[in-house]
Image (cartoon, helix red, strand yellow):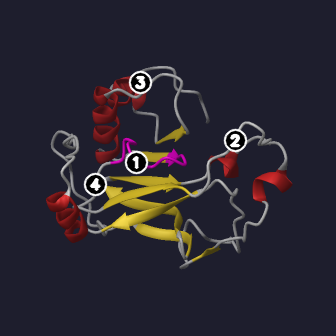
Amino acid sequence: KVIRWRDTPQKLLSESGKSVTTFVLVGRTQVPVEPEDVKALRNWVARGGRLILIDREINGSPLPKSAGWSLDGDPLQIPDFQTDPADVKSMTETVVALQPVQPSVMTSNIRSVLPSRFAARVRVVPPEDQVAANYTSSTGSAEESTPDAVPQSSESRAPVIHIADDQGALLVDYAYGLGNIVVLSDPYIVANG
């Protein structure tokens, strides 16, 4: 059953949230996602939930690291005000369909995916690259909030790239605690256009 969640993410950790198995965030939310909301989402995922983030802007999102691995990325192009999202030809002009990079449950029966020309590409950043980047960065970043008592699964902790091209990934997922986080970097794929 699909419903529009109208409560705070903290409710996912209560009795009313026990029936929710998947929580989907698409693009920028109308109500800002506050730090306490991010912590609640991370705790819920760590307890076995599945968070699906569909957005072009991966940086600054509520994505936690997984065993030190992180994701980053930016849109390749930014839409202007003349772009009509209902015009498929305009949205996919000069775009080449992307194929799965490996067989997986997520890519079962999928030959290709045609993203919009505004799709972002996700980069998977290993822990050693982050240490080097943090050492040389003078800007510093906000500390990542960690969930309370994260249960551990026996799954691989590194993110798995499912669909990509030479510019980066379109679809990535990774285990977090007992749960799973899925990142799709183009909301156009699920748009009602």
Distance, label 1 to label 4, CA atoms, is 12 Å
Front position in the image: 14 or 67 = 67
- From the viewer's perspective, is the residue at label 1 or at label 4 nearer? 1
Amino acid type of the residue tagged 4 in the rendering: Lys
Amino acid type of the residue tagged 1 in the rendering: Asn
At mark 4, the secondary structure is loop
Instruction: Please say if 22 is above or below 3.
Output: below
99 to the left or right of 60: right
Quadrant hosting residue 8: top left
At mark 2, the secondary structure is loop
Marks 3 & 2, CB-CB < 8 Å contact: no
- Label of residue 65 in the image: 4
Circle 2 residue: 80
Sequence-wise first label, 4 or 2 = 4
Q: Which residues are magenta?
A: 53-63
Sequence-wise first label, 2 or 1 = 1
Spot occupied by residue 156 in the image (x, y as percentages of width and height): 31, 69
Distance, label 3 to label 2, CA atoms, is 41 Å
Distance, label 2 to label 1, CA atoms, is 21 Å
Quadrant hosting residue 84: top right
Distance, label 4 to label 2, CA atoms, is 32 Å
Spot occupied by residue 144 in the image (x, y as percentages of width and height): 22, 44
Spot occupied by residue 41 in the image (x, y as percentages of width and height): 35, 36
Circle 1 residue: 59
Q: For the N terminus, give its image quadrant.
A: top right
- From the viewer's perspective, is the residue at label 1 or at label 3 nearer? 1
